[in-house]
Amino acid sequence: MKEYYYDKLLNIRTRRDRNNSSGASIHYHPYEPTPYSALEKLFSEYEIKENDRIVDFGCGMGRLNFFVHYFYHASVVGIEMNKDFHEKALINQNEYLKKWKRNTDKIQFLSCLAEDYKIKETDNRFYFFHPFSIQIFRKVIQNILISVEETDRELELILYYAHDDYIYFLDNETYFNLVKEIKLPGLYERNPYEHFLIYRLDYQGKQI
């Protein structure tokens, strides 16, 4: 199985314990790592460059972060509010870097609430696997938009399993523009949430 193959390759442990719902609350959803098969599909159709800096909100144990760092050499930042998952992400980071000693300064994990993370001027890609409620999502997007006012740049949001309230908000209340949809074959036909949506905000909030 891909879950075992990639975890072994990267020297990490990111599979979810089905009995562990730690981290769930009214506004923050339970940990669920993006399937490796979904990551394969995403990055077969979506380009990540070495100079990109991806922020993963609700990163859990860091699966996406290690995958992107290993295969695409981009900078990655994991934001995780749950202390236990954050500690496991740091353990994974230590084990990963023992095996793959490269670009060690391009991967980090922070323990904080998503809405408290200060968006950096180099952050330009933001990943969401439906990690929290629409109320928190709105606050995070507002932080991202404020950062653009301070430093003009092209930004993209990568949404996996995005629920309708996320999409309605982006489509009707922001300048983000849907530029790409990536459907997961064999899954999307049975569940319309099984897809990635790429939203782009160009310089000064202008859509293309």
Image: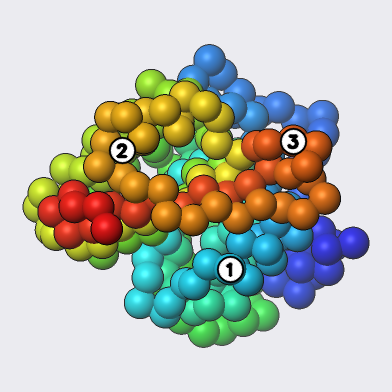
Q: Which residue lies furthest to the top in this view?
A: 26
In this picture, residue 22 sits left or right of residue 171: right
Q: Is mark 3 on a helix, strand or loop?
A: loop
Residue 168 location, x and y as percent?
Answer: 42, 28
Q: Is mark 1 on a helix, strand or loop?
A: helix
Between 36 and 60, the one lying in front of the other is 36
- Residue at position x 43%, y 77% from top? 49
Q: Residue furthest right?
A: 1
The residue carrying mark 3 is 191
- Residue 50 in which image quadrant: bottom left
Which amino acid type corresponds to the residue marked 1 in the rendered image?
Answer: Glu
Instruction: Bin the neighbour count of mark 3 within 10 Å (Cα to Cα): few under 14, some 14-19, many 20 and up.
Output: few
As helix, strand or loop, the secondary structure at mark 2 comes to helix
**What's the CA distance linking mark 3 and mark 1?**
20 Å
- Tell me if label 1 and label 2 are in contact, CB under 8 Å: no
Q: Determine which residue is flagged by label 2.
A: 141
Q: Nearer the viewer, mark 3 or mark 2?
A: 3
Quadrant for the N terminus in the image: bottom right
Q: Of the residues under marks 3 and 1, which one precedes in the sequence?
A: 1
Report the amino acid beneath label 2.
Ile
The residue wearing badge 1 is 45
Q: How crowded is mark 2: few (under 14 residues within 10 Å), some or many (20 or more)?
A: some
Above or below 176: residue 55: below
What amino acid type is highlighted by mark number 3?
Asn
Residue at 45% of width from left, 31% of height from top? 166
